[in-house]
Amino acid sequence: MNARWPWTTWVVLGVLGGLFLWGGCSDEEHFPPATSGMDDDGTQPPNSYNNDYNNDGYNNDNYNNNGYNNDNYNNNTPGSDNNPPWPDNNNNNYNTDNTAPIDTDYVPPSTDNRSDPITPVSCDGSGNCFGTCWGCALSGPCASADAACKNNTQCAAMQSCLSPTCDSLSGSAWQSCYDNCKAQNPAGETLLQQLWACVYCKGCAQDCASVGYDCSNFRDTDPPPSTDTGAPPSTDTGAPPSTDTGAPPSTDTGTPPTGAPLAANVNIQRVDAYQAFQIPLMNNGSAAQQNNSIVAGKDTLFRIYASAQGSASSSVAAQLTINTGSGTRVFQGTATTIKQGNEATLNSTLNVIVPGDDITTDMQIQAAVVDLSSNPATGNTQNAAWPASGPTHKPSVADPQAPLRIRIIPISVSGLLPDTDTTAMTRLRNRLIAQHPSNTVVLELRPAITGPAQVPPLDGLTYPGDTLGQDSWQGLLDQISNQRQADNPPPDYYYMGLVKPTSNWQGYCGRGCYAGLSWVLKSVVVNPFNQRASVTVGYINENTNYNLNTILHELGHAQGRDHAPTTGNPQGIDDKYPYTAGRIGVQGFDIVESKLYPANSTYDLMGYQEPQWISDYTWNALLKRLQDMHRTYPVASIHAPMLTFEMRTWHSVDVHPGASTHREPQQFDVAPDGGENFTVQFLDNRGVVLGETVGSIVMLSTYTGGRVFYTLPDDLPVEFVTQLRFETQYLGAITVDVPAGLYN
């Protein structure tokens, strides 16, 4: 019987959100000065998208670029990756390089700041056939079969033929597609079946038993697997080097530490938790009012402020004990001395990082200072642990419930491609891990699309229509929106276009520029889904910090965020933002870079001022968006066909100051929802109202334009309509001319 595994084919983001820089750049709105140096017979596993989730924790986001030649992880290996399963909940695998040769030894950097190497684990028994087990089998017991397929032209071609061509098919249609690919690549099909047999019958015989693959003729010819995971993790995350020497220590070695006594003559005064910002847990022996929740599944730093009373040991460490329904785990920091705690200096406190896998909604904790010296000091230990009775404090922990899934779409402009190599994608992934509340970041890289010949730096929202092949930023955004519609991914995917209009940042933005644009999606139930799209500049390796900030800024718009109060008088300011001048208001922390951000001199990523980090206000809004997305499109149904009702024709028009462009009608079963509804009037050439309907606008992130959706009343005499009239919150009263024959 033929069998196939699932694999994904490729790696998204309203009001239209844009960033503009004047005398610098505009990321729709968001730009620093250019001189600032910123930086698949019958047994058929689910289709390609069904492997995007592991329903018991979203822990294995395995993707590949089958047919597109080349990523460092899932090189044409359905539904899995070539690397060992990750030891933590942040195992976010992504595709990176569309041109580089396959490198099956590449191991991305650990996301939990642990120094222990990533090594293969026993594959069978995970309970997940197409996720955890499959990826493990490819890097372990079936590695040689995997290599044999990769190194055979026909086997690689067989995989490319199957995906994406056969991916969306099922039953006899899929079998017919498979047989066609087999006829073209007979030798490759044999090797591919040998590889599948190894996974189904050897590497994952237990986990994949329910698939029904016939293993009666399987013969094990593979040598024992190597446990070498290849190159050590890269330490380059792309962010500017931190001057803080107090980086949090490595913590979990896999075996809970035991035997360390409480430190004598030590008093714990304060305990804070950090994921992206400070969350007070205890102050002077009492539980603090916890205004923000810890997020389950994300690496967490715990800082303990302690003082010495009398003679205390010179070799102490922070210890955090976590009790859950699964048992008790203990985590220790590295040995150090007690210092005067200073909130702004990381190494002045006793620090311990707990991996995301151990941060759960049912956890109860105890923070302690333990003595690691060979001759522990004697004395009073009553104040060296909080709570003194053991791990009984239950902090507020929220479950984001859904992953953040982004597809990166490189846009080619006159042969220039944006930075999407391993370094750039690692930098982006790390920034998303550090600054977004999702505990699983899925970053996929799709093959490049061809853009215009030119992208003028200051042509943001107009359609030139000239003969030079140039286009505006809204034209680029429309390309990304159209690509999302053509790909038809699950509704939770955000599409993010990256573009490099010139070979270097200064050449593009030396005199000011647009740097990004997005739809501002106020509603989770956005229709059409193709508006979960954004586009930004792609100078990630040159102008790293600024470019990453721009990407997160535009993603924020796509997730419904308005601007934070900021300089430059941008429109679309969030009047509920709680902190003056767009400051983050609470001390920030980059857990990837081990860097603190001052509360009163760092600005929210939804503004324009630098330096930027994320405020607790924006973090909580994005967390709610993830939870709302899960409730609206739950994992159990996100890959199933969506229920549809009566389809209606929706018309749309792009409106900007002094200009408008009518778009092609579209068929929807649910009304487009941009967050603002209003009356649309149809006028004749005398100004007489011929009919009315309800319209909705999805704004651009510039808040100076957007797309209005509306239907035609049944009794409207369309031949006499010459104008539309409506009024919106951001754009005010607008009249749009209607060309003759538009509604015919």
Image (cartoon, rainbow, N blue to C red):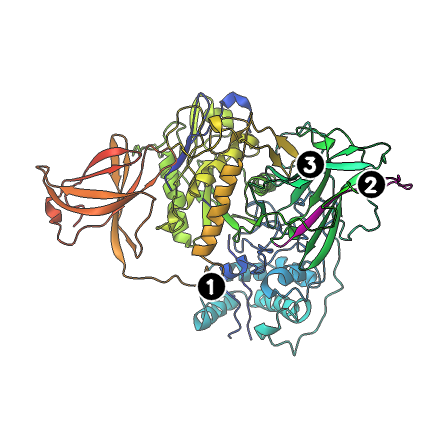
| Alpha carbon distance from label 2 to label 1 | 63 Å
- Please give the name of the residue rendered at 82% of the width and 51% of the height, measured from the top-left corner: 258
Q: Earlier in the sequence, mark 2 or mark 3?
A: 2
- Disc 1 crowd rating (10 Å Cα; few below 14, some 14-19, many 20+) is many
In-front residue for pair 24/464: 24
Q: Three-letter amino acid code at disc 1?
A: Cys
Q: Three-letter amino acid code at disc 2?
A: Ala
In-front residue for pair 380/122: 380
In-front residue for pair 67/304: 304
Frontmost of labels 3 and 1 is 3
Residue range corresponding to the magenta coloring: 362-379
Which of the 4 quarters of the picture holds residue 577? top left
Residue underneath mark 2: 263
Q: Dot 2 lies on which element? A: loop
Residue 341 on image: x %, y %: 72, 30
Q: Quarter of the image for the N terminus: give it.
A: bottom right
Question: Is residue 206 placed above or below 539 in the rendered structure?
Answer: below
Q: Dot 3 lies on which element? A: loop
Residue 282 horizontal side relative to residue 468, left or right: right
Frontmost of labels 2 and 1 is 2
Q: Dot 1 lies on which element? A: loop
Residue 647 on image: x %, y %: 27, 59
| Alpha carbon distance from label 2 to label 3 | 18 Å
Residue 419 on image: x %, y %: 54, 37
Residue underneath mark 3: 284
- Residue 671 seen in the figure: yes
